[in-house]
Image (cartoon, rainbow, N blue to C red):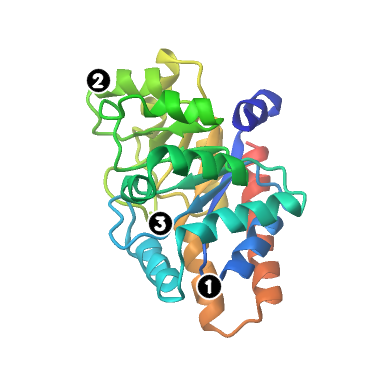
């Protein structure tokens, strides 16, 4: 699978930016993903708008609201990814999506459509390890990885289940709670990552709270990947509110993506 091949090939930590699909619009999301791939992103995470996300803070929630107001539907995700693949983007693409949307579509139909469009992996924050049934196997049969989140508050029993069942990589949550930028990262983050590494050789990628190049570099020094979400979503919203034309918005965000990628890759 593309995610496995990505981590096998990399000689440094992966830089993983996050964008909300359809915010400010689908064409700009497409341009942002292409820019991220060109600027050094190793994997791109796509946030799928949902009216009641459980893991996302106010910045990403607001972006979901804007996308939904503009008419986002699940088919928009598949169309976006198909267009990106047609554009020649080979970077692994991971969708963060609520299980409500998956089950409303029908799990098998959703998995088939996601894989057919060119999605490589799924993060389903409201489907915790231990309650996934045979979803991992069904996803794998479709050609998709299923990535579970592991929080600082996760019990040892649940942590063992996550290590066993997660494919592609394990998403290590840096701080308990919802997504958002943080001034500093927790002092026990490295210990949490090293605990997971003692249990598995699967890649451990850290997200929630990383916003600055120096934070991304610090995480990359002990983890296999650094995920930057809210800071980028906030920046896109700020630039859009300033009235920047999409081409200029993408260029400005691209410069920040390059700085983050350099920080992660140089750690």
Front-lying residue, 224 or 267: 224
**Mark 2 or 1, which is nearer the eye?**
1
Indicate left or right for 118 with 55 as reference.
right
The residue that disc 1 covers is 24
Residue 213: % across, % down: 57, 51
- Position above or below: 234 against 220: below
Question: What residue is disc 2 on?
Answer: 156
Decide: marks 2, 1 in contact (CB < 8 A)?
A: no
Labels 1 and 3: the sequence-earlier one? 1
Figure check: 60 above or below 70: above
Q: Quadrant of residue 64?
A: bottom left
Relative image position of residue 50 (x, y in whole percent): 36, 59
Please state which of residues 101 and 242 is positioned toward the viewer in this rendering.
101
x, y percentage for residue 23? 51, 68
Q: Which mark is residue 181?
A: 3
Please report the residue visible at 61 percent of the width from the left and 51 percent of the height from the top. Answer: 260
Quarter of the view holding residue 190? top left
Label 2 secondary element? helix
Nearer mark to the viewer, of 3 and 2: 2
**Foreground: disc 1 or disc 3:** 1
Q: Callout 2: few (<14), some (14-19), or many (20+) C-alpha neighbours within 10 Å?
A: few
Question: For the N terminus, which image quadrant?
Answer: top right
> Residue 267, relative to residue 136: is it above or below?
below
At a point 58% along the width and 43% down the height, the residue shown is: 119
* Label 3 packing within 10 angstroms: few (<14), some (14-19), many (20+): many
- SS state under label 1: loop
């Amino acid at each position: 699978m593309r995610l496995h091949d990505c981590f096998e090939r990399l000689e440094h930590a992966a830089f993983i930016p996050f964008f909300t699909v359809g915010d400010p619009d689908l064409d700009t999301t497409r341009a942002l993903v292409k820019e991220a791939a060109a600027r050094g992103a190793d994997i791109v995470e796509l946030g799928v708008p949902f009216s009641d996300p459980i893991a996302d803070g106010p910045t990403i929630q607001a972006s979901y609201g804007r996308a939904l107001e503009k008419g986002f539907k699940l088919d928009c995700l598949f169309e976006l990814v198909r267009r990106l693949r047609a554009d020649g983007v080979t970077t692994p693409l991971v969708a963060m999506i609520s299980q409500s949307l998956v089950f409303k579509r029908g799990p098998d139909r959703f998995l088939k459509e996601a894989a057919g469009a060119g999605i490589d992996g799924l993060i389903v924050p409201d489907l915790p390890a231990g309650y996934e049934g045979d979803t991992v196997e069904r996803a794998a049969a479709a050609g998709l990885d299923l990535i579970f989140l592991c929080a600082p508050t996760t019990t040892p029993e649940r942590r063992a289940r996550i290590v066993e069942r997660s494919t592609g990589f394990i998403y290590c949550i840096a701080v308990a709670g919802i997504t958002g930028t943080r001034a500093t990262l927790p002092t026990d983050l490295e210990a949490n990552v090293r605990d997971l590494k003692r249990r598995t050789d699967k890649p451990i990628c850290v997200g929630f709270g990383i916003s600055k190049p120096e934070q991304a570099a610090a995480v990359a020094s002990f983890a296999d990947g650094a995920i930057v979400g809210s800071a980028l979503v906030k920046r896109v919203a700020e630039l859009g509110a300033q009235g920047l034309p999409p081409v200029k918005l993408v260029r400005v965000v691209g410069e920040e993506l390059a700085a983050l990628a350099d920080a992660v890759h140089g750690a």
